[in-house]
Image (spheres, helix red, strand yellow):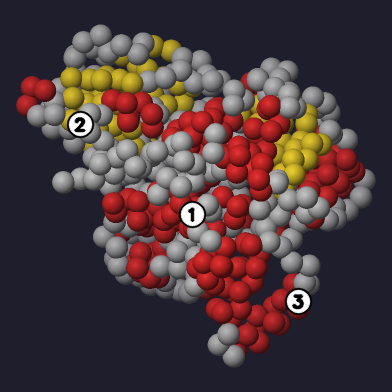
Amino acid sequence: MQIDLRLTAPGWAESSGSTDPGGADSAVVVVRADRPCADPVSPAVLRDHPGRLAAVRVEEERVVLAVDRLRSWPLFWTVTGRGDDRRLLVADSAEAVLGALEDPAACPAALEELQDAGFVTGPRTFLEGVHQVEQGAVVAVDRSTGRPAQDDYAFFRYADDEVDDPEAFGGLFLEALDAAMGRLLERAAGRRLAIPLSGGLDSRLLVAWLRLHGVEDVMTFTYGLPGSREMAVSQSVARSAGYPWHGVEIERPALLEVWNSERTASFLRQASALSALPHVQDWYALCRLVDDGVLRPGDVILPGHTIVGNMHDEKLLEEVPVSRAAIARALLRHHHSLRGRARRAERSAWTAPPVRRALTLGGMTAPTTQPAATAATQGRVVRSVIEGYNIRERQTKYINNSMRAYEQLGLEWALPMLDVEMWRAWARGSAALTATRSFYRSVIDDLWARVTGREPTGYFQATRVPAATRSRLRAGLEAMHLLGAAERGFSTWASLHSPMGFDALVTDMPRPLLTARLLGGWTVPGAWARAFTRDTWCEPAHLFGDLGRPA
């Protein structure tokens, strides 16, 4: 089998090895990495590796492909041809794959899943017969058969030796944060840090840590509709920390002008990584800041993407025993609801294998229930499955696709809140400390008070209605069987009045139709996915219109 490597040089990386396999039977390692790694395709080594990488090793009987626990850079592979003309294609970008295939064809089932979830589950991609290496995995492709064998070395699981004491766990968390941020500063080597600042928790944590440790060369930026409260809250946070702040006001005509440019078309073709809706929220703001010279080549962007989960399915922790089917339904209803069709996903043969694998990797090995499990033990398993699935399928595909925007504009990036140290620390927390964000917020509040000398205020919230009032209102609506309709109504209003104005990107759907779709269970990302797959997001892109359909 011939080996065809189509690998490109990353923006912030150190390459080792050669991109030329040098013959069918040669052994060579090809790496994209931000730091050296002793054996970049060894699961045992990668399990503890603190850096980012994508690696390929060509061996006599197999080709081994590996990515880090964040899937920082994608790796794709496919086998083409027959007999002596068979070829194993390995590439690290969507454009490289499309350029290497003679007749690339879209996978209809994958496009359907994209519109329901915002990403394609498992090792599949938008393209028929093209596979990807999943987060925290090493894949060995047999050179005689073309069959893969996968080693999942870093599926997120909560630890057995969990910590229940808030003070002790807070110490572990801050110790891990210090280690992760220290590595970041060492790697940045004096380059300016830029933080996309929201009115929420994650970016505020980064700002507080940097100020507390005396890091001066930092700038922040926020984007949103003119006069939005999030813009005001973010500016206040930056001012309190003593860092410069730049606001980018989103104006719909200017947004659409940028959106229909060739630069955006090139970004969209690359940013999906053949597996997810491009993460486009900050693209317009980044273009504006780069064009105005506010962001400069070499700046290191620090988004607040974090290992700290959100659960959303806490009620499952109260069910002992809980069935595999109940957890599977929770996963699918949470992640496959962009078009209000989560129940359809439950019957899909397409979604079943990744869900079953997540259940197994998370520790839910019993065929139906775990009757012998204690509440604590079972709760740990449930949290592992839910958070592990979220990290593998949504976080490292859809969310981390925002990194492609930075690379496209010549900027560098780092994700300290997803560092291996943070990963290990958060995995030690008990359900009482990690199932919601209450404890996480308390840590940030304490850190912020140390920086500013006062209690934090002004977190951005979608509503200012007190939590107790919302709880009573929710209970009343549920008793009258009106909760679902009320939630859809509020969600629709919030989507159409978002401070980010993202509904402007739904260019193929009139606003009244969009409103009706949102009331029926759609979300704005679901409408984006529809526009994306129809090539109406950005007319110059022509991504899906140029693809054939499988015979």
Task: Name the residue located 46 percent from the left edge and 51 percent from the top edge.
Answer: 531
Image point 42% across, 19% down: which residue?
8
* Residue projecting furthest to the top: 22
The residue singled out by tag 2 in the image is: 79
Q: Residues within 10 Å of mark 3 (few under 14, many from 20)?
A: few
84 is higher (above) or lower (below) than 387: above
Query: Picture quarter containing residue 416?
Result: top right
First-in-chain label (2 vs 3): 2
Q: Position of residue 247 (x, y in %)?
A: 78, 40
Residue 254 appears anywhere in the view: yes
Report if residue 356 is visible in the image.
no
Front residue of 139/488: it is 488
In this rendered view, identify the residue nearer to me: 245 or 228.
228
160, 542: nearer the viewer: 542
Mark closer to the observer (3, 1): 1
Mark 1 nearby-residue class (10 Å; few <14, some 14–19, many ≥20): some
Q: Which residue is mark 1?
A: 508
Which kind of residue does numbered mark 3 sit on? Ala
* Residue furthest right as drawn: 453
Q: Can you say whether 171 is above or below 375 in the image?
A: above
Q: Nearer the viewer, residue 454 or 75?
A: 75
**What kind of element bears circle 3?**
helix
What residue lies at 32% left-to-right and 26% top-to-bottom? 99
The kind of residue tagged 2 is Val
Horizontal arrangement in the rendering, residue 307 relative to residue 44 (left or right):
right
Pointer 1 with pointer 2, Cβ within 8 A: no
Contact, mark 3 vs mark 1 (Cβ under 8 Å): no
Number of disc labels: 3
Q: Which residue matches tag 3?
A: 468
Question: Mark 2: few, some, or many residues within 10 Å (few <14, many ≥20)?
Answer: many
Calculate the distance from the C-alpha at mark 2 to the C-alpha at mark 3. 57 Å
Q: Position of residue 506 (x, y in %)?
A: 53, 53
